[in-house]
């Protein structure tokens, strides 16, 4: 509604910095590259961008191993490039959110280096989680595979819920709190509009570090590793800082959990503004599954978010296409899901390249892959490189305008992407890019008038039909046609439709 803060119904575009646009010609995306493509994003019709980490890092996990929270890695540019990027974005009416990684630092961070140089028991070790013992202190495993503990030469063990190069901070140490409050201010003072908080549910661990029963592994709300009650105090402190700045600075938490009630706790009025709602992204192509996600989310979460893809999961058109013999099923379902998600109250996060209809790249050569999940599992687990392949902008061959001609991007781009470049799709009304532009434009014209609630209209089990004010959204996840309710006008359709029936794998927006 008109007076609500920008983030409540914003469409935020995730820029995976390494793979968006490379201006320097080293094969890796950078801040100047992003700046050069901002007009494309403004024309796409998004409200904000979220930049994945670009701070100095040894890149053990694509930059989610931060060595210095107050600078820019030379690979991506300089602080001056960052300031210029923020200014140019604001000029175009785009807000900028940056990633904050508070669960762990890089092992190259000066604090961890000081901890290693100090003896056991020294205050320098207390900023991380070090323990004595002949064996690892408990049975916790790293999210990336293998044990979550690594032993240092003097015999102590330190905790890393991700790679060994990503030691976990000890949030029971007040210095860690002070440091991150200062880091937030550093970026807020540079004009950022908000933060995406990495592993937001992980900062505190149960103080006794008890074993996790093997059946209870994974991101669960009832776990000694995740979602400890103390973590909420951190976000209350952060909210005070955000609120002390003008212009609705906002924070969205990356909260993986098995409970919507748990998710809702992160967005209480004095905590984070939003938390990612991954339930839809985890749901199969099924009207029943989507309906459950929508009902549970709207019942529990006051400012919901919707996400189909990000840099950690298989791209959604490839997920939705699995098991179907029709190669067009995935893309068609992706368009229909997008329209459904964008018809719901709340804000949506898009992942770069979904507007081009990029599929997951499944055949990357092993020697090109860089995800620690792949390398640590000895190649057994494919990992996340397949959704991180640099964007195709123009041209008919690699580097497809991602890098200057003659440069090889850090991951190889499929030759078939020649027909998926932004330039190729621009001006083609039938392209995915044109479709995204249309959906976002119609949503903009409607959004101020739409209520924050939906009403389900009757439909078969295979379809979802709901009204939100005068907007009716219908999606058909089944195999046969579905009758449409009465309407006055078709506002948008994700594919060919009949005036009275909706074909499979299609969504429509109707005016009641
Ligand atoms: C979540 C990020 O999205 C992912 O890419 C990263 O590997 C982990 N957090 C660890 O920081």
Image: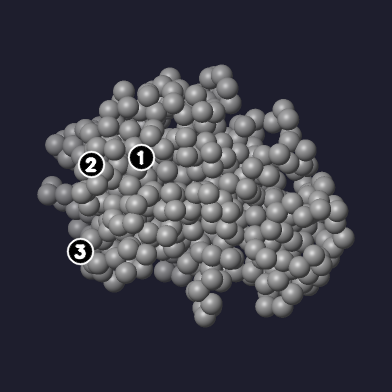
Residue located 54% across and 57% down the image: 431
Residue 199's place in the image compared with 99, above or below, is below
Residue hosting label 3: 367
Earlier-in-chain disc, 1 versus 3: 1
Q: Is residue 89 left or right of residue 284?
A: left
Give yes or no for contact between labels 3 and 2 (Cβ–Cβ under 8 Å): no
Q: Secondary structure at mark 1?
A: loop
- Residue at mark 2: 25
Image-based side of 71 in relation to 118, left or right: right
Q: Residues within 10 Å of mark 3 (few under 14, many from 20)?
A: few
- In the picture, measured across the screen, residue 279 lies left or right of residue 71, that is right
* Mark toward the viewer: 1 or 2: 2
Q: Quadrant of the N terminus?
A: top right
- Asked if marks 1 and 3 touch (Cβ < 8 Å), the reply is no
Q: Mark 1 — residue?
A: 53
Disc 2 element: loop
What's the distance in space between the residues labelled 1 and 3, CA to CA? 24 Å
Question: How many residues crowd around disc 2 within 10 Å: few (fewer than 14), some, or many (20 or more)?
Answer: some
Q: Marks 1/2: CA distance?
A: 20 Å
| Residue placed furthest toward the bottom | 325
Residue 496 visible in rendering: yes
Protein image colouring: one colour
**Residue at left offset 69%, top offset 50%:** 344
- Left or right: 495 with respect to 398? right
Residue 25 on image: x %, y %? 23, 41
**Residue at x 20%, y 58% (from the top left corner):** 134
- The residue positioned farthest toward the left in the image shown: 153
Q: Is the residue marked by circle 1 packed among few (<14), some (14-19), or many (20+) residues within 10 Å? A: many
Q: CA distance from mark 3 to mark 2?
A: 21 Å
């Amino acid at each position: 509604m008109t007076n609500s803060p920008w983030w409540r119904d914003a469409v935020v575009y995730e820029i995976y910095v390494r793979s968006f646009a490379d201006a320097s010609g080293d094969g890796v995306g950078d801040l100047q590259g992003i700046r050069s493509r901002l007009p494309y994003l403004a024309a796409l019709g998004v409200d904000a961008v979220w930049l994945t980490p670009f701070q100095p890092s040894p890149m053990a996990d694509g930059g989610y191993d931060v060595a210095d929270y107050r600078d820019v890695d030379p690979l991506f540019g300089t602080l001056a490039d960052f300031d210029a990027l923020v200014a140019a974005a604001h000029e175009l009416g785009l807000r900028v959110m940056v990633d904050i990684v508070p669960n762990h630092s890089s092992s190259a961070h000066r604090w961890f280096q000081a901890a290693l140089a100090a003896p056991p028991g020294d205050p320098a070790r207390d900023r991380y989680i070090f323990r004595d013992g002949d064996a690892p202190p408990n049975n916790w495993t790293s999210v990336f595979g293998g044990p979550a503990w690594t032993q240092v030469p003097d015999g102590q063990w330190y905790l890393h819920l991700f790679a060994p190069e990503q030691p976990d901070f000890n949030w029971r140490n007040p210095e860690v709190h002070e440091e991150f409050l200062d880091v937030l201010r550093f970026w807020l003072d540079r004009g950022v509009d908000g933060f995406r908080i990495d592993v937001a549910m992980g900062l505190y661990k149960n103080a006794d570090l008890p074993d996790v029963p093997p059946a209870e592994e994974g991101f669960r709300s009832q776990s000694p590793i995740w979602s400890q009650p103390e973590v909420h105090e951190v976000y209350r402190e952060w909210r005070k800082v955000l609120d002390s700045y003008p212009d609705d600075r906002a924070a969205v938490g990356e909260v993986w959990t098995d409970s919507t009630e748990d998710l809702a706790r992160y967005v209480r009025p004095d905590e984070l503004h939003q938390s990612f709602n991954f339930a839809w992204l985890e749901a199969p192509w099924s009207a029943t599954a989507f309906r459950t996600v929508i009902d549970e989310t709207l019942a529990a979460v006051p400012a919901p978010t919707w996400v189909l893809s990000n840099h950690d999961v298989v791209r959604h058109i490839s997920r939705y296409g699995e098991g179907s013999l029709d190669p067009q099923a995935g893309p068609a379902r992706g368009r229909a899901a997008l329209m459904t998600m964008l018809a719901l109250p709340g804000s949506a996060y898009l992942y770069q390249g979904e507007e081009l209809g990029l599929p997951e790249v499944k055949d990357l050569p092993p020697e090109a892959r860089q995800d620690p999940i792949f390398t640590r599992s000895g190649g057994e687990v494919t990992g996340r490189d397949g959704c991180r392949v640099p964007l195709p902008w123009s041209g008919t061959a690699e580097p497809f305008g991602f890098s200057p001609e003659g440069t090889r991007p850090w991951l190889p781009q499929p030759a078939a992407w020649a027909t998926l470049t932004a330039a190729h799709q621009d001006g083609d009304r039938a392209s995915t890019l044109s479709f995204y532009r249309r959906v976002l434009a119609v949503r903009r014209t409607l959004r101020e008038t739409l209520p924050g609630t939906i009403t389900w209209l009757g439909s078969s089990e295979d379809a979802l039909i709901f009204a939100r004010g005068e907007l009716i959204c219908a999606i058909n996840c089944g195999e046969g046609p579905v009758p449409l309710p009465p309407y006055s006008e078709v506002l948008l359709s994700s594919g060919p439709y009949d005036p009275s029936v909706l074909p499979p794998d299609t969504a429509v927006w109707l005016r009641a």
